[in-house]
Image: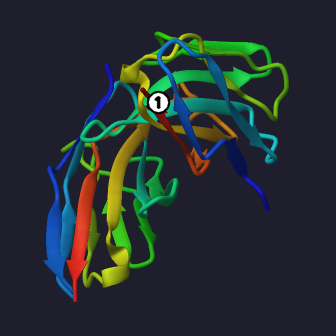
Amino acid sequence: NAGVTQTPKFQVLKTGQSMTLQCAQDMNHEYMSWYRQDPGMGLRLIHYSVGAGITDQGEVPNGYNVSRSTTEDFPLRLLSAAPSQTSVYFCASSPQGYTEAFFGQGTRLTVV
Amino acid sequence: GNSVTQMEGPVTLSEEAFLTINCTYTATGYPSLFWYVQYPGEGLQLLLKATKADDKGSNKGFEATYRKETTSFHLEKGSVQVSDSAVYFCALSDRIFGGKLIFGQGTELSVKP
């Protein structure tokens, strides 16, 4: 009964470092997405995917890359971390584009 | 573009009080509407949903009705408990440009015994 699994749960990076946030789902959902949560701003969409091999930008894509080589996995790459990327990151999946999304537990990232 | 506006928080209530959290939206077409809840230190969980006008979503004593004429989806509960303390997010999903949710800014609810 795993659902959406994100790793790591916590991470501290130095400015300029790169890293990959992992996201995996075991529900065979076609749609997956990444959001960041900042105080007073709700969740904002970074990138999303409507199926393996297909990705698109969301509201705040700059500084992030994604790829979707399998239905199960949707990693988020930070190319060169900046303090402005300090946030809580959530991965989500859904069976169809307009249905409810299932969320992972989140990754709390601090860039110093 | 699509957007969601939520009532400003934080909201503090006494146990057994009535709760309303206002949510209005702007969207083209016929979006699906959701309320999500986030307990401290956790991810978001779906609380309830409505997929067409006049639908009422309900769960755990919470209710919300999809009102197309007022573009609203207000969350209500008749008697809150301490365990309802959490952050509540209103969200919509576009049926045409699917795969992404648009969230309101969240409303923090604190229920005191």
Quadrant of the image occupied by residue B82: bottom left
Q: Quadrant of the C terminus of chain A?
A: top left
Chain containing mark 1: B
Residue B31 visible? The answer is no
Color encoding of the figure:
rainbow
| Residue drawn at (38%, 79%) of the image | B61
| Residue A62 located left or right of residue B67 | right
Q: Which of A111 and A52 is in front in this view?
A: A111
Q: What residue type is labelled 1?
A: Asp
Q: Where is residue A70 in the image (x, y as percent from the top left)?
A: 85, 26
Density class for disc 1 (Cα within 10 Å; few <14, some 14-19, many ≥20) is many
Q: Disc 1 marks which residue?
A: B94
Answer above or below: position of B43 versus B27: below
Answer above or below: position of A98 versus A14: below
Q: Quadrant of the N terminus of chain A?
A: bottom right
Q: Find numbered disc 1 in the image and state the secondary structure of the residue it sits on.
A: loop
| Residue drawn at (60%, 38%) of the image | A91
Q: Which of B61 and A53 is in front in this view?
A: A53
| Residue A40 located left or right of residue B43 | left
Q: Where is residue B111 in the image (x, y as percent from the top left)?
A: 23, 77
What is the tally of numbered marks visible in this picture?
Answer: 1
Q: Where is residue A15 in the image (x, y as percent from the top left)?
A: 47, 17
Residue B109 visible? The answer is yes
| Residue drawn at (82%, 30%) of the image | A71
User: Residue reaching furthest right?
Assistant: A70
Q: Which of A62 and A9 is in front in this view?
A: A9
| Residue B26 located left or right of residue A2 | left
Quadrant of the image occupied by residue B18: bottom left
